[in-house]
Amino acid sequence: MSVTTTIAKRELSSYFFSPIAYVAMILFLAACGVAFIDDFRPGQVVAMRSIFDWMVWLLVFIVPVLCMGLLAQEFSSGTVETLMTAPVTDQQVVLGKFLGAMGFLLALVLPTLLYVVLLAIYGRPDYGPILSGYLGIVLVGALFTAVGLFCSALTRSQVVAAVSAAAFLFAVTVIPWWVRGKVILDQWISKAVDQFVQTRYADFSKGVIDTGNVVFFIACTVLLLFLTIKVVESRRWR
């Protein structure tokens, strides 16, 4: 575990030396600030529903950019050979990079706690939906990070990794949401659409913590990390 922690710390610290990470942080917080205006208006439910809904859409595009170089950069620069010849396992490499990226993602979301403080000062927040909303964001962020890491393991190109991850997240998040809102669906198709990310996350933003949804996000994240490990193992012997 100490090796995994070392890799995670190295990956996390590298974000704070990357201009792309700072640009992503600024854009994310600026967009969250705009979304928070709706939650701060008189008469609105004091539960930050608008900002939580917007966070998911923002992460669809921001996470792929943050994760595109996790492994692709290692493969393209050749530093992966040094990493793989060190006394570390593929599991430690993948888990360390995942935890490092998740650490920065949490740092990205952390400043939004200021909005909770503002709501507490000027109103009476419903802390239940707020806490469940943050739990949902962490779970969604973990799944998105696992997707970005998996796509980064498949290619040497950071651009290809970012585009493929964004396309995948768009397909499992935005498209099902759009289809559900614009198309009249049969009952069985509607149930299938409900299995995608946005519908499952919506419960968290409403203050509902469904065990099935928690298991869904954790299981999908673990599966993608497992697949990433297998990809790294296969590339080690090429």
Image (spheres, helix red, strand yellow):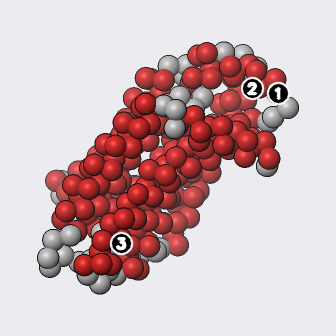
Asked if residue 16 lies left or right of residue 95, the reply is left
Relative image position of residue 119 (x, y in whole percent): 29, 74
Crowd tier of the residue under label 2, counting other residues whose Cα lies within 10 Å: few below 14, some 14–19, many 20 or above:
some
Question: Residue 86's mark?
Answer: 1
Q: What residue type is labelled 3?
A: Val
Asked if residue 169 lies left or right of residue 98, the reply is left
Looking at the image, residue 45 lies above or below residue 196: below
Q: Is residue 223 visible?
A: no
Disc 1 is placed on an element classified as: loop
Which circle's residue, 2 or 3, is located before the other in the chain? 2
Q: Which amino acid does label 2 sit on?
A: Leu
Disc 2 is placed on an element classified as: helix
Separation of marks 2 and 3 at Cα, in angstroms:
43 Å
Which circle's residue, 3 or 1, is located before the other in the chain? 1
Question: Residue 117's mark?
Answer: 3
1 and 2 marks in contact (CB < 8 Å): yes
Quadrant of the drawing holding the C terminus: top right
Asked if residue 34 lies left or right of residue 77, the reply is left
Relative image position of residue 107 (x, y in whole percent): 49, 52
Looking at the image, residue 29 lies above or below residue 131: above
Q: Mark 2 points at which residue?
A: 83
Residue drawn at the location 38% of the way across and 47% of the way down? 59
| Residue nearest the observer in this picture, 219 or 10 | 10
Residue drawn at the location 79% of the way across and 49% of the way down? 1
Crowd tier of the residue under label 3, counting other residues whose Cα lies within 10 Å: few below 14, some 14–19, many 20 or above:
few
Disc 3 is placed on an element classified as: helix
Residue drawn at the location 26% of the way across and 50% of the way down? 31
